[in-house]
Amino acid sequence: MNANYTPLPYAAELAAAGVPDEYHEWLGTMGVGALVVKMGIVFGEMSAARMTATMPVEGNTQLAGLLHGGAHLVLAETLGSFAAAFHAGPARRPVGIEIGATHHRGITSGLVTGTATALHLGRTLATHEVVMTDADGRLLSTARITNMILDV
């Protein structure tokens, strides 16, 4: 390492969230966001067309002990927005304009895996379907998120 190297402010946060080193320079001045950290979201695959992440059920439940429905949406919006950002590139910014979900099954423990798949990657809009499953591959919820892509 170069003696003059100064780590980016969010390098540790990016590493903990599973963000590959190749994206640290781009995301290193903004990180992954406080909610992503609080929810325990860890990224896997990262591209505009397909993005995956896991999130623990523990710490993200509602009173009955089930994963909170809003937690499903946090995971979906995180994946869809990050994938839209990858499509937009560093000079443009996505902003969410629509999200909706259907909850198919509850979960009380373990990890939830979210997979965002691009439905449309246009110049001004990006739409992703996000499917959340449990460790056995059972469908938990399905969401759709649309982001408008703005010039910075």
Image (cartoon, helix red, strand yellow):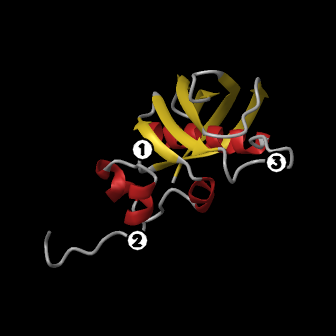
Which residue is nearer to you in this view: 118 or 12? Answer: 12
Mark 1 to mark 3 CA distance (whole Å)? 36 Å
Which residue is nearer to you in this view: 99 or 38? Answer: 38
The spot of residue 10 in percent (x, y) is 42, 66
Mark 1 to mark 2 CA distance (whole Å)? 20 Å
Query: Residue placed farthest to the left in the image?
Result: 2
Name the residue rendered at 30%, 71% in the picture.
7
Which residue is label 2 attached to? 9
Q: Which label sits in the foreground, 3 or 2?
A: 3
Give, as a three-letter code, the residue at label 3.
Gln
Which residue is label 1 attached to? 89
- Label 3 near label 1: C-beta < 8 Å? no
| Mark before the other along the chain sequence, 3 or 2 | 2
The spot of residue 22 in percent (x, y) is 29, 49
The spot of residue 75 in percent (x, y) is 63, 42
Q: Which mark is residue 62?
A: 3
Circle 1 crowding by C-alpha within 10 Å: few under 14, some 14–19, many from 20: some
| Mark before the other along the chain sequence, 1 or 3 | 3
62 relative position to 141: left or right: right
Element under disc 1 = loop
Query: Residue placed farthest to the bottom in the image?
Result: 4
Asked if residue 121 shows in the view, the reply is: no
